[in-house]
Image (cartoon, grey):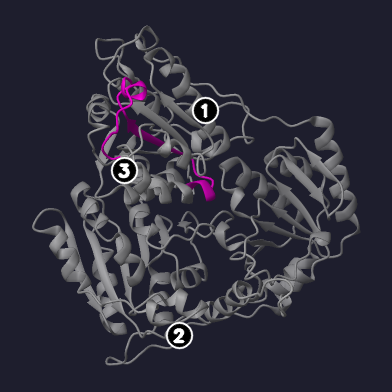
């Protein structure tokens, strides 16, 4: 989640499409007009101006000239990654913190490699600018077959692939069009909070043009606006339903990420006195120390008593929710549309009935907050039934470390300056149960759920925090199966001196897959994980490693790691293969049931 921004940084990420009338842009010292004012330098200047001051890149012959130009912008940090997929994950993590990210790759072999990460950013509503080198502008009419391509004499294959996972695609083959095409793509990324694709012919990056010959005019974007009549009608209709409700509830979804939307959500909560729950992918987007916060709503695997309060409510105001088989626990929620006021991007739907368009989410929340009547009935009911949480008992010196004990100690180490990142898997369920202190941040990739995402995302998030919030520290929980997919990017973390605390949970397989559908394919080869990370270190960088198989070893490792600022701390914890959260067992069985529904006409399809 984006936090407050220092005065010299952009707040583009905090003001996405529909949540602001204007955009604040960078007030940095962008290089003035000079002989270097070429296309590549102009791209770098635009990135810095919108607040993207790190570019994650992998070199290849089609983007080398472009990389030379990007290096001329002193305020654009270049981070050289081990492969394109991880670079894309890093740009995803960076965008979560800074509001926009960038990855630069070569043609086809780089572009096709990064595409999975870009698809994830698209699914998760993250503005990631993908810049790819492209064929020489003369090659398009030459009938040549190029290396790195699929062997045809036309070069649109990568462009066609990216049309499926970006909201805008431009191909710069003529220097005269570059300024317009570049600004069009960047604008779309910021306004729609989705990735965009920019392909730059490899022979254009160092060319000058009059449109680059002066410092850029400050970036300005049009924004969505609210139709006042539609807003008034939506608020009136919502108030009519809420006025008849006995115990209304507020439910925050992942699209409440923008800062203005979160502030408006808090304002509505304070005015209404309704209990507030969050969907799992919105954890951390509403303050968990708030007196009206009742926990996470996730159907059968909700926080204690949260599901009962939400599903028994007669009106649930759901703001920014995204409903997938994962977030609905295999479509098993008892929350029905006829009980919901759905507040989505630019649209409000009243209890499966009238719908009002052209209504910006934050505008609706603010207008409703100004007129709503307070009702504490739902919160009172929650307080009557909720029980105090308990901690697992302390384990003996020789007893194998249990997963719930591991996360008990991770809970104790969280501070207001912690950023917690959870990999796909049982770490989801365990980290979602943790209580975030005020100021702590949390990220997971739930909609796309790409195993291995977190390693690159940790790199990107750390780079973003180092620029804007150097007092913060990333704590990551990563399973062994996920880690094996993208492990080499720890090398890049060491190379650039970031200092996360990584818990590598070694339980011998893909635990989340085991609980959905088990088989021999869910068992992986065990690695010497700390030995592997030390090999990546190879005497260069700041690294500290530890292994914990018991609770006393874990306590000792955590106490040491939190003191080692400036060092990447890698703690391998060993748990039993079948030791997972009860929530994963429940969730896995319900998702498995949804996956195994038979086709219509072949029997059981319910």
Mark 2 or mark 1: which is in front? 1
Q: Which tag, 3 or 2, sits closer to the chain's start?
A: 3
Return the residue nearer the eye: 559 or 145.
145
Q: What's the residue at 58%, 66% (across, down)?
A: 326
**Disc 3 to disc 2, how far (Cα)?**
47 Å
Q: Is residue 315 magenta?
A: no
Residue 110 - label: 3
Is residue 279 shown left or right of residue 497? right
Q: Which tag, 1 or 3, sits closer to the chain's start?
A: 3
Residue 131: give x, y in percent of width and height.
37, 34
Residue span colored magenta: 121-148
Mark 1 or mark 3: which is in front? 3
Mark 3 or mark 2: which is in front? 3
**Disc 1 to disc 3, how far (Cα)?**
24 Å
| Label tally | 3
Compared to residue 211, the image places residue 581 above or below, namely below
Secondary structure at badge 1 equals: helix
Residue 577 figure quarter: bottom left
Is residue 321 shown left or right of residue 402? right
Compared to residue 547, the image places residue 288 above or below, namely above
Residue 466: give x, y in percent of width and height.
31, 44
Residue under label 1, please give it. Answer: 187
Q: Is residue 75 visible?
A: yes
């Amino acid at each position: 989640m984006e936090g407050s921004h220092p005065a010299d940084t952009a707040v583009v990420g905090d003001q996405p499409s529909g949540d602001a009338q204007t955009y604040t842009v960078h007030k940095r010292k962008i290089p003035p007009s000079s002989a270097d004012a070429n296309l590549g330098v102009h791209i770098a200047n635009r990135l810095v101006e919108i607040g993207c001051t790190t570019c994650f890149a992998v070199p290849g012959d089609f983007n080398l000239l472009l990389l030379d130009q990007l290096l001329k912008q002193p305020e654009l940090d270049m981070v050289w990654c081990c492969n394109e997929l991880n670079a894309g994950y890093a740009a995803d993590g960076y965008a979560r913190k800074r509001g926009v990210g960038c990855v630069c790759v070569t043609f086809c072999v780089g572009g096709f490699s990064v595409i999975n990460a870009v698809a994830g950013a698209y699914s998760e509503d993250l503005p990631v600018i993908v810049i790819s080198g492209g064929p020489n502008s003369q090659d398009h009419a030459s009938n040549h077959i190029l290396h790195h391509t699929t062997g045809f004499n036309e070069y649109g294959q990568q462009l066609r692939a990216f049309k499926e996972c970006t909201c805008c695609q431009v191909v710069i083959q003529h220097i005269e069009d570059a300024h317009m095409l570049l600004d069009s793509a960047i604008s779309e990324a910021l306004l729609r909070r989705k990735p965009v694709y920019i392909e730059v012919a490899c022979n254009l990056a160092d060319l000058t043009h009059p449109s680059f010959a002066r410092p850029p005019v400050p970036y300005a974007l049009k924004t969505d606006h609210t139709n006042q009549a539609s807003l008034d009608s939506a608020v009136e209709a919502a108030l009519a339903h809420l006025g008849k409700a006995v115990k209304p509830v507020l439910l925050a979804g992942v699209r409440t990420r923008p800062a203005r939307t979160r502030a408006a959500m808090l304002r509505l909560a304070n005015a209404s006195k309704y209990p507030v729950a969050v969907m799992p992918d919105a954890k951390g987007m509403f303050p968990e120390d708030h007196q009206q916060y009742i926990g996470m709503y996730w159907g059968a695997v909700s926080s204690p008593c949260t599901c009962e309060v939400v599903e028994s409510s007669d009106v649930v105001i759901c703001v920014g929710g995204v409903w997938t088989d994962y977030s609905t626990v295999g479509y098993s929620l008892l929350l029905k549309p006829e009980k919901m006021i759905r507040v989505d991007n630019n649209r409000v739907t009243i209890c499966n009935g009238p719908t009002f368009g052209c209504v910006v989410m934050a505008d609706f929340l603010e207008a409703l907050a100004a007129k709503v009547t307070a009702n504490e009935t739902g919160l009172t009911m929650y307080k009557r039934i909720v029980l105090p949480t308990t901690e697992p008992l302390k384990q003996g010196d020789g007893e194998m470390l249990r997963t719930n004990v591991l996360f008990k100690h991770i809970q104790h180490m969280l501070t207001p300056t912690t950023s917690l990142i959870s990999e796909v898997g049982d770490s989801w369920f365990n980290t979602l149960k943790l209580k975030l202190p005020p100021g702590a941040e949390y990220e997971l990739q739930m909609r796309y759920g790409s195993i291995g995402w977190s390693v690159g995302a940790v790199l990107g998030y750390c780079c973003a925090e180092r620029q804007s919030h150097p007092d913060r520290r990333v704590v990551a929980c990563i399973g062994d199966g996920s880690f094996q997919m993208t492990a080499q990017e720890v090398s890049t973390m060491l190379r650039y001196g970031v200092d996360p605390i990584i818990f590598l949970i070694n339980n011998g397989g893909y635990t989340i897959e085991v609980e959905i559908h088990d088989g021999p394919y869910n068992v992986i080869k065990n690695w010497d994980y700390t030995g592997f990370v030390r090999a990546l270190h190879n005497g260069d960088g700041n690294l500290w490693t530890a292994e914990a198989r018991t609770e006393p070893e874990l306590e000792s490792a955590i106490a040491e790691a939190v003191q080692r600022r400036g060092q990447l701390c890698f703690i391998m914890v060993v748990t039993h293969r079948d030791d997972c959260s009860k929530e994963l067992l429940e969730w896995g069985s319900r998702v498995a049931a949804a996956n195994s529904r038979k086709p219509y006409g072949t029997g059981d399809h319910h």
